[in-house]
Image: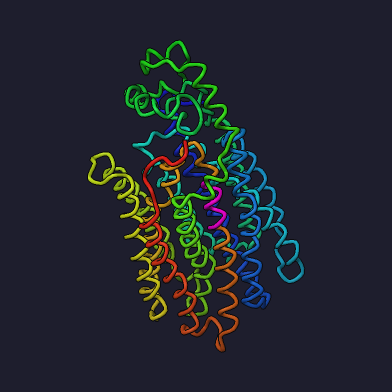
Amino acid sequence: MASSKWPQRRIIVLLTFVCTAVCYVERTGFSIAYTAAANSAGITQKSKGNLLSAFFYGYSISQVPGGWVAQRIGGRRVLLWSFFAWTLACIATPIDPRHNSAVIILIRVLVGVAQGFIIPSVHTVLAQWVPPHERSRSVSLTTSGMYLGAAFGMLFLPELVHWSGPRAVYVMEALMGLTWAIFWHFYSIDPPLSEHPKASAAGFGAPADIELKSIHSVKAGEENGLLAAATKENWKKVGGLEISAAAAATAARSRTHIPWKKILQSLPVWAIVVNNYTFHYVLYVLMSWLPTYFDQGLHVGLQHMGASKTMPYVVMFVMSNVGGLVADYFVTRKIMNVAHTRKWINGVGFVVAAAGLGIMPKISSVQSAIVCSSVILGSLALGRAGFAVNHMDIAPRYAGIVMGISNTAGTFAGIVGVNLTGWILQSSSHGPADLGSWRLVFGLPAVLCVFSAAVFCKYASGDRVFE
Protein backbone atom coordinates (compact mmCIF):
# COMPACT_ATOMS: atom_id res chain seq x y z
CA MET A 1 0.00 0.00 0.00
CA ALA A 2 2.09 2.90 -1.27
CA SER A 3 1.38 6.57 -0.79
CA SER A 4 0.61 8.63 -3.88
CA LYS A 5 1.68 11.87 -2.20
CA TRP A 6 5.11 10.86 -0.93
CA PRO A 7 7.84 9.08 -2.95
CA GLN A 8 7.99 5.41 -2.02
CA ARG A 9 11.72 5.53 -1.29
CA ARG A 10 11.09 8.06 1.49
CA ILE A 11 8.42 5.85 3.02
CA ILE A 12 10.94 2.99 2.96
CA VAL A 13 13.64 5.13 4.63
CA LEU A 14 11.19 6.32 7.31
CA LEU A 15 10.05 2.78 8.07
CA THR A 16 13.63 1.47 8.29
CA PHE A 17 14.41 4.35 10.65
CA VAL A 18 11.56 3.26 12.93
CA CYS A 19 12.72 -0.35 12.52
CA THR A 20 16.17 0.33 13.98
CA ALA A 21 14.63 2.49 16.72
CA VAL A 22 12.35 -0.34 17.88
CA CYS A 23 15.23 -2.84 17.83
CA TYR A 24 17.31 -0.63 20.10
CA VAL A 25 14.42 0.02 22.46
CA GLU A 26 14.38 -3.77 22.86
CA ARG A 27 18.13 -4.05 23.45
CA THR A 28 18.32 -1.13 25.85
CA GLY A 29 15.16 -2.24 27.60
CA PHE A 30 16.41 -5.74 28.24
CA SER A 31 19.68 -4.42 29.66
CA ILE A 32 17.78 -2.12 32.04
CA ALA A 33 15.18 -4.70 33.06
CA TYR A 34 17.66 -7.53 33.53
CA THR A 35 20.14 -5.31 35.44
CA ALA A 36 17.39 -4.38 37.90
CA ALA A 37 16.36 -8.02 38.34
CA ALA A 38 19.97 -9.24 38.59
CA ASN A 39 20.90 -6.62 41.20
CA SER A 40 17.90 -7.62 43.31
CA ALA A 41 18.87 -11.29 43.03
CA GLY A 42 22.55 -10.71 43.86
CA ILE A 43 23.88 -11.88 40.47
CA THR A 44 27.66 -11.33 40.06
CA GLN A 45 29.08 -8.89 37.50
CA LYS A 46 30.74 -11.73 35.58
CA SER A 47 27.49 -13.70 35.37
CA LYS A 48 25.65 -10.57 34.33
CA GLY A 49 28.19 -9.99 31.56
CA ASN A 50 27.83 -13.58 30.35
CA LEU A 51 24.05 -13.27 30.07
CA LEU A 52 24.08 -9.80 28.52
CA SER A 53 26.46 -11.09 25.84
CA ALA A 54 24.21 -14.06 24.93
CA PHE A 55 22.30 -11.87 22.47
CA PHE A 56 25.47 -11.30 20.48
CA TYR A 57 26.15 -15.02 19.98
CA GLY A 58 22.88 -15.38 18.13
CA TYR A 59 23.32 -12.03 16.41
CA SER A 60 26.76 -13.01 15.08
CA ILE A 61 25.73 -16.24 13.37
CA SER A 62 22.85 -14.73 11.39
CA GLN A 63 24.50 -11.63 9.88
CA VAL A 64 25.97 -13.18 6.72
CA PRO A 65 23.00 -15.56 6.23
CA GLY A 66 20.77 -12.51 6.64
CA GLY A 67 22.55 -10.68 3.83
CA TRP A 68 22.48 -13.77 1.62
CA VAL A 69 18.77 -14.46 2.18
CA ALA A 70 17.90 -10.79 1.62
CA GLN A 71 19.89 -10.87 -1.63
CA ARG A 72 18.00 -13.98 -2.76
CA ILE A 73 14.40 -13.26 -1.80
CA GLY A 74 14.39 -9.55 -0.96
CA GLY A 75 14.96 -7.65 2.27
CA ARG A 76 11.30 -6.71 2.65
CA ARG A 77 10.09 -10.21 3.49
CA VAL A 78 13.12 -11.01 5.62
CA LEU A 79 12.49 -7.93 7.77
CA LEU A 80 8.87 -8.92 8.34
CA TRP A 81 9.72 -12.49 9.38
CA SER A 82 12.57 -11.32 11.62
CA PHE A 83 10.33 -8.94 13.53
CA PHE A 84 7.69 -11.56 14.17
CA ALA A 85 10.36 -14.00 15.40
CA TRP A 86 12.08 -11.72 17.93
CA THR A 87 8.73 -10.37 19.15
CA LEU A 88 7.59 -13.88 20.09
CA ALA A 89 10.91 -14.66 21.76
CA CYS A 90 10.91 -11.37 23.68
CA ILE A 91 7.49 -11.86 25.23
CA ALA A 92 8.50 -15.36 26.40
CA THR A 93 11.41 -14.05 28.53
CA PRO A 94 11.20 -15.20 32.19
CA ILE A 95 11.52 -12.68 35.00
CA ASP A 96 13.54 -14.45 37.72
CA PRO A 97 17.27 -14.56 36.77
CA ARG A 98 18.17 -16.95 39.61
CA HIS A 99 16.14 -19.96 38.50
CA ASN A 100 15.76 -19.29 34.78
CA SER A 101 19.23 -18.19 33.69
CA ALA A 102 19.58 -20.99 31.11
CA VAL A 103 16.17 -20.21 29.61
CA ILE A 104 16.94 -16.48 29.49
CA ILE A 105 20.27 -17.16 27.77
CA LEU A 106 18.55 -19.35 25.18
CA ILE A 107 15.88 -16.72 24.51
CA ARG A 108 18.50 -13.96 24.18
CA VAL A 109 20.37 -16.10 21.66
CA LEU A 110 17.13 -16.57 19.67
CA VAL A 111 16.37 -12.84 19.79
CA GLY A 112 19.91 -12.23 18.54
CA VAL A 113 19.46 -14.66 15.65
CA ALA A 114 16.22 -12.99 14.60
CA GLN A 115 17.59 -9.46 14.86
CA GLY A 116 20.77 -10.48 13.06
CA PHE A 117 18.80 -10.66 9.81
CA ILE A 118 17.56 -7.10 10.18
CA ILE A 119 20.53 -4.79 9.47
CA PRO A 120 21.76 -6.65 6.34
CA SER A 121 18.17 -6.71 5.07
CA VAL A 122 17.76 -2.99 5.75
CA HIS A 123 20.89 -2.21 3.76
CA THR A 124 19.75 -4.46 0.91
CA VAL A 125 16.45 -2.56 0.79
CA LEU A 126 18.19 0.84 0.92
CA ALA A 127 20.61 -0.15 -1.85
CA GLN A 128 17.61 -1.00 -4.03
CA TRP A 129 15.69 2.20 -3.36
CA VAL A 130 18.15 5.03 -2.59
CA PRO A 131 20.20 6.79 -5.34
CA PRO A 132 23.93 7.50 -4.77
CA HIS A 133 23.45 11.22 -4.09
CA GLU A 134 21.12 10.40 -1.15
CA ARG A 135 23.01 7.44 0.32
CA SER A 136 24.82 9.14 3.19
CA ARG A 137 21.82 10.94 4.63
CA SER A 138 19.43 8.02 4.05
CA VAL A 139 21.70 5.47 5.73
CA SER A 140 22.54 7.95 8.50
CA LEU A 141 18.85 8.63 9.16
CA THR A 142 18.07 4.92 9.25
CA THR A 143 20.91 4.09 11.63
CA SER A 144 20.14 7.13 13.80
CA GLY A 145 16.94 5.34 14.76
CA MET A 146 19.15 3.08 16.87
CA TYR A 147 20.19 6.00 19.03
CA LEU A 148 16.73 7.51 19.31
CA GLY A 149 15.47 4.09 20.38
CA ALA A 150 18.22 3.82 22.98
CA ALA A 151 17.40 7.33 24.25
CA PHE A 152 13.71 6.41 24.55
CA GLY A 153 14.66 3.27 26.46
CA MET A 154 16.98 5.10 28.84
CA LEU A 155 14.40 7.82 29.52
CA PHE A 156 11.22 5.81 30.09
CA LEU A 157 12.08 2.20 30.84
CA PRO A 158 13.84 2.62 34.23
CA GLU A 159 10.61 4.19 35.53
CA LEU A 160 8.55 1.40 33.95
CA VAL A 161 10.73 -1.20 35.67
CA HIS A 162 10.51 0.71 38.96
CA TRP A 163 6.71 0.89 38.95
CA SER A 164 5.66 -2.24 37.03
CA GLY A 165 8.65 -4.59 37.04
CA PRO A 166 10.72 -6.16 34.23
CA ARG A 167 7.77 -8.06 32.71
CA ALA A 168 6.14 -4.76 31.66
CA VAL A 169 9.25 -3.90 29.64
CA TYR A 170 9.21 -7.21 27.75
CA VAL A 171 5.51 -6.86 26.91
CA MET A 172 5.88 -3.25 25.75
CA GLU A 173 8.81 -4.15 23.49
CA ALA A 174 6.88 -7.02 21.93
CA LEU A 175 3.89 -4.75 21.23
CA MET A 176 6.17 -2.18 19.56
CA GLY A 177 7.71 -4.88 17.37
CA LEU A 178 4.32 -6.23 16.34
CA THR A 179 3.04 -2.73 15.51
CA TRP A 180 6.05 -2.01 13.28
CA ALA A 181 5.63 -5.33 11.46
CA ILE A 182 2.00 -4.46 10.66
CA PHE A 183 2.98 -1.06 9.23
CA TRP A 184 5.83 -2.63 7.23
CA HIS A 185 3.48 -5.24 5.77
CA PHE A 186 0.99 -2.65 4.52
CA TYR A 187 3.23 0.28 3.54
CA SER A 188 6.38 -1.27 2.06
CA ILE A 189 6.83 -2.70 -1.45
CA ASP A 190 9.64 -4.28 -3.45
CA PRO A 191 11.16 -2.19 -6.25
CA PRO A 192 9.86 -3.25 -9.69
CA LEU A 193 12.43 -5.54 -11.36
CA SER A 194 14.20 -4.06 -14.39
CA GLU A 195 12.15 -0.90 -14.12
CA HIS A 196 13.36 0.92 -11.04
CA PRO A 197 16.56 2.87 -11.81
CA LYS A 198 17.95 2.90 -8.28
CA ALA A 199 17.40 -0.84 -7.95
CA SER A 200 20.03 -1.47 -10.60
CA ALA A 201 22.73 -0.65 -8.08
CA ALA A 202 21.68 -3.63 -6.00
CA GLY A 203 21.43 -6.13 -8.83
CA PHE A 204 18.07 -5.14 -10.26
CA GLY A 205 17.27 -3.28 -13.47
CA ALA A 206 19.89 -1.51 -15.56
CA PRO A 207 23.58 -2.46 -15.59
CA ALA A 208 26.17 -0.26 -13.90
CA ASP A 209 27.24 1.74 -16.95
CA ILE A 210 23.78 3.27 -17.37
CA GLU A 211 22.87 3.57 -13.68
CA LEU A 212 23.93 7.19 -13.18
CA LYS A 213 22.37 8.26 -16.46
CA SER A 214 19.14 6.62 -15.39
CA ILE A 215 19.09 8.32 -12.02
CA HIS A 216 19.74 11.79 -13.38
CA SER A 217 17.24 11.38 -16.21
CA VAL A 218 14.41 10.43 -13.87
CA LYS A 219 15.14 12.78 -10.99
CA ALA A 220 11.99 14.79 -11.63
CA GLY A 221 9.94 11.62 -11.70
CA GLU A 222 11.40 10.49 -8.41
CA GLU A 223 10.27 13.60 -6.62
CA ASN A 224 6.58 12.99 -7.33
CA GLY A 225 6.73 9.27 -6.66
CA LEU A 226 6.12 8.08 -10.22
CA LEU A 227 9.00 5.62 -10.30
CA ALA A 228 7.58 3.12 -7.85
CA ALA A 229 4.67 2.53 -10.24
CA ALA A 230 6.69 2.63 -13.47
CA THR A 231 6.14 -0.08 -16.10
CA LYS A 232 8.03 -0.97 -19.29
CA GLU A 233 5.57 1.13 -21.29
CA ASN A 234 5.85 4.30 -19.19
CA TRP A 235 9.55 3.81 -18.41
CA LYS A 236 10.42 5.71 -21.60
CA LYS A 237 8.04 8.44 -20.60
CA VAL A 238 9.57 8.79 -17.13
CA GLY A 239 13.22 8.14 -17.75
CA GLY A 240 13.81 8.24 -21.48
CA LEU A 241 15.56 4.87 -21.21
CA GLU A 242 14.59 1.36 -22.25
CA ILE A 243 16.13 -1.52 -20.33
CA SER A 244 16.80 -4.59 -22.45
CA ALA A 245 16.09 -8.22 -21.61
CA ALA A 246 19.86 -8.80 -21.56
CA ALA A 247 20.24 -6.18 -18.82
CA ALA A 248 17.51 -7.88 -16.81
CA ALA A 249 19.25 -11.23 -17.25
CA THR A 250 22.53 -9.71 -16.04
CA ALA A 251 20.74 -8.36 -12.98
CA ALA A 252 19.22 -11.78 -12.26
CA ARG A 253 22.65 -13.44 -12.46
CA SER A 254 24.05 -10.92 -9.95
CA ARG A 255 21.52 -12.13 -7.39
CA THR A 256 22.71 -15.73 -7.68
CA HIS A 257 26.45 -15.27 -8.21
CA ILE A 258 28.24 -13.69 -5.25
CA PRO A 259 32.03 -13.16 -5.55
CA TRP A 260 32.82 -14.44 -2.07
CA LYS A 261 36.56 -14.86 -2.64
CA LYS A 262 36.98 -11.37 -4.05
CA ILE A 263 34.95 -9.86 -1.24
CA LEU A 264 36.93 -11.64 1.48
CA GLN A 265 40.27 -10.68 -0.12
CA SER A 266 39.38 -7.01 -0.56
CA LEU A 267 41.30 -4.53 1.60
CA PRO A 268 38.53 -1.88 1.32
CA VAL A 269 36.10 -4.47 2.71
CA TRP A 270 38.43 -5.22 5.60
CA ALA A 271 38.79 -1.49 6.31
CA ILE A 272 35.00 -1.40 6.79
CA VAL A 273 35.11 -4.59 8.91
CA VAL A 274 37.78 -3.22 11.28
CA ASN A 275 35.90 0.02 11.83
CA ASN A 276 32.58 -1.76 12.32
CA TYR A 277 34.23 -3.92 14.97
CA THR A 278 35.57 -0.91 16.87
CA PHE A 279 32.36 1.12 16.57
CA HIS A 280 30.29 -1.68 18.04
CA TYR A 281 32.86 -2.54 20.70
CA VAL A 282 32.47 0.98 22.10
CA LEU A 283 28.72 1.15 21.55
CA TYR A 284 27.85 -2.21 23.10
CA VAL A 285 30.17 -1.78 26.08
CA LEU A 286 28.66 1.62 26.87
CA MET A 287 25.08 0.47 26.23
CA SER A 288 25.49 -2.60 28.44
CA TRP A 289 27.65 -1.15 31.22
CA LEU A 290 26.78 2.55 31.53
CA PRO A 291 23.88 1.67 33.87
CA THR A 292 26.39 -0.14 36.12
CA TYR A 293 28.94 2.70 35.78
CA PHE A 294 26.42 5.31 36.93
CA ASP A 295 24.83 3.11 39.60
CA GLN A 296 27.92 1.60 41.26
CA GLY A 297 30.79 3.78 40.02
CA LEU A 298 29.16 7.20 40.48
CA HIS A 299 26.46 6.00 42.93
CA VAL A 300 23.52 7.47 41.03
CA GLY A 301 20.68 5.24 39.84
CA LEU A 302 19.23 5.76 36.37
CA GLN A 303 15.76 6.48 37.76
CA HIS A 304 17.20 9.49 39.61
CA MET A 305 19.01 11.01 36.61
CA GLY A 306 15.96 12.31 34.75
CA ALA A 307 16.23 13.14 31.07
CA SER A 308 20.00 13.74 31.31
CA LYS A 309 20.71 10.02 30.99
CA THR A 310 19.37 10.11 27.42
CA MET A 311 21.81 12.81 26.29
CA PRO A 312 24.46 10.43 24.83
CA TYR A 313 21.89 8.78 22.58
CA VAL A 314 20.18 12.03 21.59
CA VAL A 315 23.58 13.42 20.61
CA MET A 316 24.22 10.25 18.59
CA PHE A 317 20.90 10.74 16.79
CA VAL A 318 21.76 14.34 15.91
CA MET A 319 25.39 13.71 14.92
CA SER A 320 24.52 10.68 12.80
CA ASN A 321 22.24 12.84 10.66
CA VAL A 322 24.72 15.73 10.64
CA GLY A 323 27.38 13.33 9.36
CA GLY A 324 25.13 12.09 6.57
CA LEU A 325 24.16 15.60 5.46
CA VAL A 326 27.77 16.85 5.54
CA ALA A 327 29.04 13.82 3.60
CA ASP A 328 26.38 14.17 0.89
CA TYR A 329 27.06 17.93 0.69
CA PHE A 330 30.80 17.37 0.22
CA VAL A 331 30.21 14.77 -2.49
CA THR A 332 27.46 16.56 -4.45
CA ARG A 333 29.25 19.93 -4.32
CA LYS A 334 32.53 18.20 -5.25
CA ILE A 335 34.35 19.68 -2.25
CA MET A 336 35.90 16.22 -1.82
CA ASN A 337 35.58 13.00 -3.77
CA VAL A 338 33.77 10.04 -2.21
CA ALA A 339 36.92 8.38 -0.85
CA HIS A 340 38.31 11.52 0.81
CA THR A 341 34.89 12.38 2.25
CA ARG A 342 34.48 8.95 3.83
CA LYS A 343 38.04 8.94 5.22
CA TRP A 344 37.85 12.47 6.58
CA ILE A 345 34.55 12.13 8.39
CA ASN A 346 35.44 8.64 9.69
CA GLY A 347 38.83 9.81 10.98
CA VAL A 348 37.47 12.87 12.78
CA GLY A 349 34.76 10.82 14.48
CA PHE A 350 37.00 8.01 15.69
CA VAL A 351 39.90 10.18 16.88
CA VAL A 352 37.63 12.47 18.92
CA ALA A 353 35.95 9.39 20.41
CA ALA A 354 39.38 8.03 21.40
CA ALA A 355 40.15 11.28 23.23
CA GLY A 356 36.84 11.10 25.09
CA LEU A 357 37.47 7.50 26.13
CA GLY A 358 40.85 8.52 27.50
CA ILE A 359 39.25 11.22 29.65
CA MET A 360 36.22 9.19 30.85
CA PRO A 361 37.83 7.23 33.75
CA LYS A 362 39.27 10.47 35.22
CA ILE A 363 35.80 11.95 35.68
CA SER A 364 34.07 11.75 39.07
CA SER A 365 30.87 13.77 38.55
CA VAL A 366 27.69 12.55 36.91
CA GLN A 367 27.24 15.66 34.76
CA SER A 368 30.79 15.46 33.37
CA ALA A 369 30.40 11.74 32.70
CA ILE A 370 27.20 12.37 30.75
CA VAL A 371 28.88 15.08 28.65
CA CYS A 372 31.94 12.93 28.02
CA SER A 373 29.96 9.84 27.03
CA SER A 374 27.88 12.08 24.75
CA VAL A 375 31.04 13.31 23.01
CA ILE A 376 32.29 9.73 22.60
CA LEU A 377 29.10 8.32 21.15
CA GLY A 378 28.27 11.45 19.13
CA SER A 379 31.68 11.39 17.48
CA LEU A 380 31.31 7.73 16.59
CA ALA A 381 27.87 8.44 15.13
CA LEU A 382 29.42 11.16 12.98
CA GLY A 383 32.01 8.64 11.81
CA ARG A 384 29.31 6.26 10.60
CA ALA A 385 28.90 8.50 7.55
CA GLY A 386 32.33 7.12 6.64
CA PHE A 387 32.61 3.37 7.15
CA ALA A 388 28.90 2.49 7.46
CA VAL A 389 27.98 3.96 4.07
CA ASN A 390 31.14 2.84 2.29
CA HIS A 391 29.90 -0.68 1.51
CA MET A 392 27.27 0.89 -0.72
CA ASP A 393 30.05 2.79 -2.53
CA ILE A 394 32.28 -0.20 -3.20
CA ALA A 395 29.67 -2.97 -3.55
CA PRO A 396 26.16 -1.61 -4.18
CA ARG A 397 25.02 -4.91 -5.73
CA TYR A 398 26.20 -6.83 -2.66
CA ALA A 399 25.51 -4.22 0.03
CA GLY A 400 23.64 -6.68 2.26
CA ILE A 401 26.40 -9.28 1.97
CA VAL A 402 29.23 -6.85 2.82
CA MET A 403 27.15 -5.35 5.62
CA GLY A 404 26.50 -8.84 6.95
CA ILE A 405 30.23 -9.60 7.02
CA SER A 406 31.19 -6.33 8.69
CA ASN A 407 28.28 -6.51 11.14
CA THR A 408 29.37 -10.03 12.11
CA ALA A 409 32.66 -8.48 13.19
CA GLY A 410 30.72 -5.80 15.04
CA THR A 411 28.71 -8.47 16.81
CA PHE A 412 31.83 -10.34 17.91
CA ALA A 413 32.97 -7.01 19.32
CA GLY A 414 29.84 -7.07 21.47
CA ILE A 415 30.62 -10.59 22.69
CA VAL A 416 34.24 -9.73 23.46
CA GLY A 417 33.64 -6.26 24.86
CA VAL A 418 30.66 -7.02 27.11
CA ASN A 419 32.26 -10.21 28.50
CA LEU A 420 35.71 -8.66 28.88
CA THR A 421 34.28 -5.68 30.73
CA GLY A 422 32.50 -7.98 33.19
CA TRP A 423 35.73 -9.92 33.75
CA ILE A 424 37.77 -6.72 34.26
CA LEU A 425 35.32 -5.35 36.81
CA GLN A 426 35.00 -8.71 38.58
CA SER A 427 38.79 -9.01 38.80
CA SER A 428 39.21 -5.58 40.37
CA SER A 429 39.69 -5.62 44.14
CA HIS A 430 36.87 -3.09 44.62
CA GLY A 431 34.78 -4.05 41.59
CA PRO A 432 32.83 -1.43 39.62
CA ALA A 433 32.64 0.83 42.69
CA ASP A 434 36.31 1.74 42.13
CA LEU A 435 36.61 4.29 39.29
CA GLY A 436 40.18 3.09 38.76
CA SER A 437 38.83 -0.28 37.54
CA TRP A 438 37.21 1.55 34.62
CA ARG A 439 40.54 2.78 33.20
CA LEU A 440 41.15 -0.44 31.31
CA VAL A 441 37.47 -0.69 30.38
CA PHE A 442 37.67 2.65 28.51
CA GLY A 443 41.35 2.52 27.57
CA LEU A 444 41.11 -0.55 25.32
CA PRO A 445 38.47 0.91 22.97
CA ALA A 446 40.39 4.22 22.86
CA VAL A 447 43.36 2.39 21.34
CA LEU A 448 41.04 0.54 18.94
CA CYS A 449 39.55 3.84 17.73
CA VAL A 450 42.94 5.28 16.77
CA PHE A 451 43.99 2.05 15.07
CA SER A 452 40.73 1.77 13.12
CA ALA A 453 40.89 5.37 11.90
CA ALA A 454 44.40 4.72 10.56
CA VAL A 455 43.31 1.50 8.79
CA PHE A 456 40.35 3.20 7.12
CA CYS A 457 42.48 6.15 6.02
CA LYS A 458 45.00 3.77 4.47
CA TYR A 459 42.80 1.14 2.77
CA ALA A 460 39.28 2.51 2.22
CA SER A 461 38.06 3.24 -1.30
CA GLY A 462 35.29 5.38 -2.72
CA ASP A 463 35.12 3.54 -6.07
CA ARG A 464 32.99 0.57 -7.03
CA VAL A 465 35.14 -2.51 -6.43
CA PHE A 466 32.53 -5.20 -7.23
CA GLU A 467 30.41 -5.05 -10.38
x and y percent of residue 225 in the render?
40, 24
The reply to whether the magenta stretch includes residue 353 is no
Magenta-colored segment: predominant secondary structure: helix
Where on the picture, by quarter, is residue 215?
A: top left
Residue occupying the far top of the picture: 233
Q: Is residue 438 left or right of residue 345?
A: right
Image position of 347 with respect to 99: above or below: above
Q: Residue at x 55, y 68 (%)?
A: 417
Count of picture labels: 0
x and y percent of residue 405 in the render?
55, 50
Q: Residue at x 41, y 28 (%)?
A: 7
For the record, the magenta segment spans 402-410
Residue nearest the viewer, comparing 359 with 295: 359
The reply to whether the magenta stretch includes residue 408 is yes
Q: Is residue 126 left or right of residue 40?
A: left
Where on the picture, by quarter, is residue 65?
A: top right
Residue nearest the viewer, comparing 439 with 156: 439
Image position of 77 with respect to 345: above or below: above
Image position of 262 with respect to 271: above or below: above
What colouring method underlies this structural image? rainbow
x and y percent of residue 25 in the render?
53, 54
Residue occupying the far bottom of the picture: 429
Q: Residue at x 63, y 49 (%)?
A: 62
Q: Is residue 421 left or right of residue 305?
A: right
x and y percent of residue 175 in the render?
61, 47
